Image (tube, rainbow, N blue to C red):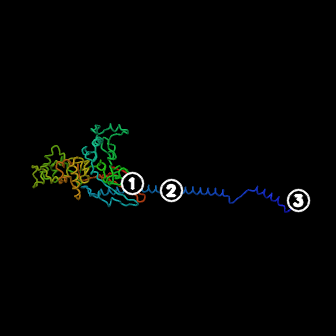
Amino acid sequence: MTMQMPWDNRGFDGAKARAARLAPRVCPWDVRGSGLVLVAVLWILAVMTAVVAVVGQTSRLNMKMAMAATDEVRCKWACRAGTENAIGILNEDPKDSDCLADLWSDNDEDFNDVVLERCRYSVRVYDEAGKLNINVATKDQFMALPYMEEEIAEAIVDWRDDNDDPQPLGAEAGYYENLPIPYKIRNGPFKTVRELLKVKGVTEEKLYGEDANLNGLLDANERDGDLSPPPDNGDDRLDQGWIAYLTCYSYERNVDGAGEDRININQANQQQLQDGLGLKASQAKWIVDNRGGGFRSIADLINDRSPKTASEGSGGNQDQAEPMDMQTFGQIADRITISGEKKLPGKININTAPVAVLKTLFGVDDQAEQIARSIVADRAALAYGYTSVADLLNQSSISLERFKSVADVVTVRSDVFTIQCLATADVTGATFRTESVVDRSASPCTILYWYQGANF
């Protein structure tokens, strides 16, 4: 029997070793466990950061979208305000004659950069009577326009006529109904100018030219060649399309500058001519005696043999006819008519028409352009433009024969205008455009056409 001495610790050590092997090992500084926790925390932080960033970005985007939507509504009503402002000025404008010096045309203070709450608007007003009416213009008049082609001129006439007989180079129903995407021809008056895009041969480039936004200005994108739309030749001159020279709305009320009905020289009797026009009895008798089956123009009252001034005397002898003199004709030209219609479509305002439109009145030769330019120069020197079509007789470049050819297709006043308005928001830069065609002859003003959106 072996005795274990008190100082013999082998058994104790063995038990201690066994206990150590059986006990779980806990190490507070275990690197692997701490690394996993740290990675998990970092991932959570990254995900939370990404979520916050996405939420913030979405919030900012939603805020910008909300501001843009609000500013678009703001600009929409700013355009409406600009349109109403222009209508108000048109209604206040004297209607005896209309020229480019009137407030509806030349009005920087009321029309350019008008400031409203957080936005501003600009307005441009155009006289529709200063354009060629596509519902009454002849083929020759179309041919006088820049870049016009004979096939297109005839196709325009075919589109508006009431038959299916095409002109030699034109197009009628058969052409349009056999297109890949067929449609019907109007065979009636154009409803809008943009309807021209449905006519054979008319393209957006021809109709709009380089002036894509129709502001009458040469913008940067309209002189950069092919870098950005619209297509342009890259020069510093604005080539306007046909839309600047064409309309389907223009007409003239058959009244004089005071708004009174004109006297029909083909129907009025001698006494009515005397009382209504202030003519001498002898002059009124001459009109009645010489109208035969009816004058075809008010200019038929004069000819190369007409005296410059009236003869002296009271003219009380009703048995003696006295030819109309040039001076008296000039005084009554705006007060007489050969038509019984209340509205005379397609009259061109010689006070507002540009050279390209005035040319269509006188032909396609070089002399026509010279006459047109002389009219533009002459009217610019007059404070209120021409006050009567008879004022053209004072133009040295216009012969009596040429005056007779245009006397019944020109006017000096207008009632139908196009109003274009552009509004821009101050903060977001959002824009809104409107275009309207208004007729101020009625009260309240009649809206004939309305378009709104980002672009015309």
Label 1: element kind: strand
Which amino acid does the dot numbered 3 rest on? Met
Residue 92, x across and y down, in percent: 29, 58
Q: Which residue is mark 2?
A: 57
Q: Which residue is mark 1?
A: 432
Label 2: element kind: helix
Q: Are marks 1 and 2 in contact (CB under 8 Å)?
A: no
Q: What is the CA distance from the residue labelled 1 to the residue labelled 3?
A: 111 Å
Residue 206, x across and y down, in percent: 32, 47
Q: Nearer the viewer, residue 335 or 186?
A: 186
Q: Residue at x 61, y 57 (%)?
A: 41
User: In the picture provided, is 342 more to the left or to the right than 79?
Assistant: left
User: In the picture provided, is 426 more to the left or to the right than 150?
Assistant: right
Q: Are marks 1 and 3 in contact (CB under 8 Å)?
A: no
Q: Callout 1: few (<14), some (14-19), or many (20+) C-alpha neighbours within 10 Å?
A: many
Which amino acid does the dot numbered 2 rest on? Gln
Marks 2 and 3, the one that precedes in the sequence: 3
Marks 1 and 2, the one that precedes in the sequence: 2
Which amino acid does the dot numbered 1 rest on? Phe
The outermost residue toward the bottom is 7
* Residue depth check, mark 2 versus mark 3: number of the one nearer the observer: 3
Residue 285, x across and y down, in percent: 13, 49
Q: Callout 3: few (<14), some (14-19), or many (20+) C-alpha neighbours within 10 Å?
A: few
Can residue 324 be seen at all in this image of the molecule?
yes
Marks 1 and 3, the one that precedes in the sequence: 3
Q: Which mark is residue 3?
A: 3
